[in-house]
Image (cartoon, rainbow, N blue to C red):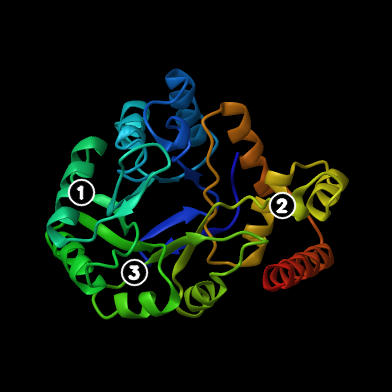
Amino acid sequence: MIDGVRVSLGGQLDVRRLGFGAMRITGPGVWGEPADRDEAIRTLRRAVELGVDFIDTADSYGPFVSEDLIAEALYPYPADLVIATKGGMVRSGPGEWAPVGRPEYLRQCVEMSLRRLRVDRIDLYQFHRPDPRVPIVEGLGALREMHEAGKIRLIGLSNFTAPQLEEARTVVDPVSVQNRYNIVDRVQEPVLDICERDGIVFIPWAPIASGRMARAGGPLDTLAAAHGATISQLCIAWLLHRSPVMLAIPGTSKVAHLEQNVAAAELSIPGETWVKLEADAQAHLASAAVAMAE
């Protein structure tokens, strides 16, 4: 059962810092139905049983499949469950994604997510990715209108750089930013710095490290084994250690894997061990940068 510290979304919604990412309850390439629909539904229900009170999804996961499954599995929702979704991406096939930030499209996305999730207001609605063809302020202006109409409670951003975040804040007051981030992929550190400074929740996607750090006998593998944990659990625990504004959302379509991920919140690792691991990660990043430059 998840317990412990919480994080506040805009001072309005308090959730535990280990949530559930619902991208993986779809088919291969985040396309179509999952291989085992019943298991996906069991996974969603088990997440809530284990104390997860924040579920992240998007209309493009499937597309539409993830939102539909969440409603099928969990509606009527527990009073304390926060469901976050995203809009602004279109799909043409497995593994294919394209941003669309036109205001009229984003309004349509909100309306359709409301219908699929069977709610009158979306707790947290995130602009999935800036569209280079449409000014950020135009798309966010549409989301602000939906917020003012009572259809969105809180607005978040996804895949925004630090300059884009600052531009977005001229139009809306984002309570969260969801960017790619893990112990060996820390390009978005400047965004995390802003989030820490201003009390914005940071939601890391792709939270599990790969490559040399995670291979057999590598630093993550060695440390995980020393603590009776998996590499995934160690990566999740590091994220929770890294920042008080971090809201980790590891995802899966399997109950057993979900239970492993949730157990990561209980890992107890000394601070000096994290310092050593971060030093190893920095060395890994430095060597990778040199290799790319050669």
Query: Which element carries disc 1, helix, strand or loop?
Result: helix
Q: Is residue 268 visible?
A: no
When the figure is inspected, residue 116 is found, relative to residue 250, above or below; the finding is: above
Location of residue 168 by image quarter: bottom left
Q: Is residue 274 left or right of residue 38?
A: right
Across and down, in percent, residue 245 comes to 53, 66
Nearer the observer, disc 1 or disc 2? 2
Residue with the mark numbered 3: 174
Residues 173 and 166: in front is: 166
Q: Is residue 100 left or right of residue 211?
A: left
Q: Of marks 1 and 3, which one's residue comes earlier in the chain?
A: 1
Residue that appears at 16% across and 46% down: 111
Q: Quadrant of the C terminus?
A: bottom right
Sequence-first tag of 1 and 2: 1
Q: Position of residue 280 (x, y in %)?
A: 80, 65
Q: Say what amino acid the circle numbered 3 marks.
A: Pro
- Residue for badge 1: 109
Residue 4 rendering spot, x and y as whole percentages = 60, 53
Neighbours of disc 2 within 10 Å: few (<14), some (14-19), many (20+): few
The relative height of residue 5 versus residue 35 in the rendered view (above or below) is: below
- Say left or right for 108 vs 217: left
Image quadrant in which you'd find residue 166: bottom left
For label 2, the residue is 211
Q: How far is disc 1 from disc 2 in space, using C-alphas?
A: 36 Å
Determine if residue 15 is in view: yes
Q: CA distance from mark 2 to mark 3?
A: 33 Å
